[in-house]
Image (cartoon, rainbow, N blue to C red):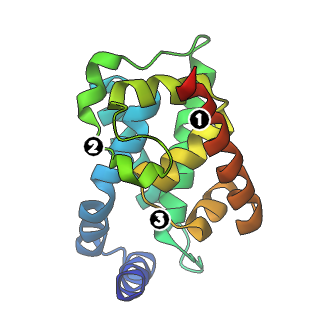
Amino acid sequence: MPAEINQKKLVYRIIKNHDPEAYGQLYDLFVARIYRFIFFKVGSKEEAEDLTSDVFLKTWQYLTKNKSLEIKSFSGLIYQIARNALVDLYRAKANRQEFSLDLANEFIIDEEKFGAIDASHDVARILQALKKIKQEYQEVLVFKYIEELSIKEIAEILKKTPINVRVTLHRAMIVLKKSLKV
């Protein structure tokens, strides 16, 4: 909870005073997480770096354009902006770029967090199975187990209720487990 309060204070400083130092602190807290989230979706290091920069620029512009903004969660805001940037990218590209399994080492996934998934499964196999399930399931699994966001944060990003997120997460785990057994 203290980290969330600190983030709210930093956001307040940005909105009211356009404080670049406060934004720098938020940048340091979130840059690796946002990069990892985007990299997982695009599979290209250069493209992920460019999109990550765009996301932080758009976030700064959003926060500084209106002094009467009320931001409940900075993480929810920045992940929503990242999702929107990815949607824009997908729209710009007629065909989706596939994730290269050669880059699987870029991810550090704590396999214990996947519960019933056996620890003997390697990262590449999990990522391969993850790519085969529907987009909605991919997102909730990535947000929960790779980005380590709370159900509440995921709900805010996806604009769903926490109960809906829990149900989707449960269904996604079932589908992922089935996909790994095949």
Q: Earlier in the sequence, mark 1 or mark 2?
A: 2
Contact? badges 1 and 3 (CB < 8 Å): no
Residue appearing at x 22%, y 73% in the figure: 21
- Tell which of 169 and 120 is nearer to you: 120
Q: Position of residue 66 (x, y in %)?
A: 56, 71
Kindly indicate the quadrant of the structure image that contains residue 106: top left
User: Of the residues shown, which amino acid type is indicated by label 3?
Assistant: Ser
User: Of the residues shown, which amino acid type is indicated by label 1?
Assistant: Leu
Q: Specify whether residue 147 is in view.
A: yes
Cα–Cα gap, marks 1 and 2: 18 Å
Q: Earlier in the sequence, mark 3 or mark 2?
A: 3
Kindly indicate the quadrant of the structure image that contains residue 5: bottom left
The residue labelled by disc 3 is: 75
Contact? badges 3 and 2 (CB < 8 Å): no
Cα–Cα gap, marks 1 and 3: 26 Å
Checking the image for residue 176, the label placed there is 1
Kindly indicate the quadrant of the structure image that contains residue 28: bottom left
Q: In the rendered view, does 75 fall on the left or right side of 20?
A: right
SS class, disc 1: helix
